[in-house]
Image (cartoon, helix red, strand yellow):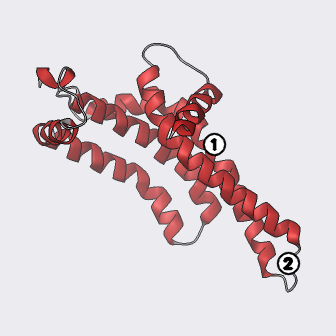
C-alpha cells in the first residue's frame, strides 16, 4: 500500500481504491456498522413520522458520524490499519464542527417543514409557493455544499481550522467550478 501515493491517475483510481478497500475490508465494514448504529435514532424518528425531530437528531448524530466515517476511510485509503475505536476518537474530535455544519444545513429543511402545512389551504397564496421554492433551492444548494464541506473539514483540520462558514465558502468555490 506504500505505492498508493505515487500512482494516483485517472485510469488507476478505481483499481487502487478497490484494492485499498479490499485490504481494509474489516475496518470498512466496522466503520459502516458504527455509522449505521449512530444513524438509527434518526431513522426510527423518521419512520414514525416525526420529521422535525428527525432533522435535529440527524444533526446531532448523523453529521458527526459521517465525519468519523470519512476519517476512517481516509486512513484506509492511506494504507493505515486502525482499530474501530479510532471511529469513536474521530467522532469526538469532529463532533462540534460537524454539528455546526449540519445546523446550517438543517435550517432550510426546518423552514420547508414549517411551510408545508400551509399547502393544505384551499387557496394557497403565491408567497407560500415562492417560499417553498426558496426552501427547496436552499436545500439543494446545501446538499451540494455539504458534499464538499465534510471532506474539506477532514482534510483541512490537521493543517488549520477554518470556520464553518469558511468551509462553506471553500465548498462554494469548488462546487462552482463544476
Q: Are the residues flagged by discs 1 and 2 in contact, CB closer than 8 Å?
A: no
Q: Nearer the viewer, residue 30 or 163?
A: 163
Q: Is residue 5 above or below residue 72?
A: above
Q: Nearer the viewer, residue 174 or 151?
A: 174
Q: Residue at x 71, y 57 (%)?
A: 135
Across and down, in percent, residue 148 comes to: 49, 37
Q: Secondary structure at mark 2?
A: loop
Of badges 1 and 2, the one in the foreground is: 2
Identify the residue position indicated by label 2 in the image: 124
Q: Is residue 22 left or right of residue 98?
A: left
Q: Residue at x 74, y 57 (%)?
A: 134
Identify the residue position indicated by label 1 in the image: 103
Q: Is residue 9 above or below residue 28?
A: above
Q: Is residue 161 above or below residue 19?
A: above
Q: Residue at x 32, y 34 (%)?
A: 87
In space, the residues marked 1 and 2 are separated at their CA atoms by 29 Å
Q: Quadrant of residue 164?
A: top right
Q: Is residue 91 left or right of residue 138?
A: left
Q: Nearer the viewer, residue 71 or 149?
A: 149
Q: Which mark is residue 27?
A: none
Across and down, in percent, residue 1 comes to: 11, 26
Between discs 1 and 2, the one toward the N terminus: 1
Amino acid at each position: 500500500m506504500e505505492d498508493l501515493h505515487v500512482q494516483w491517475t485517472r485510469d488507476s483510481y478505481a483499481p487502487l481504491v478497490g484494492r485499498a478497500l479490499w485490504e481494509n475490508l474489516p475496518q470498512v465494514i466496522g466503520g459502516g456498522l458504527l455509522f449505521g448504529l449512530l444513524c438509527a435514532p434518526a431513522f426510527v424518528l423518521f419512520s414514525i413520522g416525526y420529521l422535525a425531530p428527525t432533522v435535529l437528531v440527524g444533526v446531532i448524530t448523523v453529521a458527526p458520524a459521517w465525519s468519523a466515517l470519512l476519517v476512517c476511510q481516509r486512513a484506509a485509503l492511506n494504507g493505515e490499519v486502525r482499530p474501530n475505536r479510532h471511529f469513536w476518537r474521530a467522532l469526538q474530535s469532529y463532533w462540534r464542527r460537524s454539528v455546526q455544519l449540519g445546523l446550517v444545513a438543517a435550517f432550510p429543511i426546518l423552514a420547508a417543514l414549517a411551510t408545508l402545512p400551509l399547502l393544505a389551504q384551499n387557496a394557497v397564496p403565491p408567497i407560500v409557493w415562492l417560499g417553498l421554492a426558496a426552501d427547496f433551492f436552499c436545500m439543494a444548494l446545501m446538499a451540494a455544499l455539504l458534499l464538499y464541506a465534510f471532506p474539506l473539514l477532514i482534510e483541512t483540520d490537521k493543517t488549520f481550522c477554518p470556520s464553518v462558514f469558511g468551509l462553506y465558502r471553500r465548498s462554494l468555490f469548488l462546487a462552482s467550478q463544476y
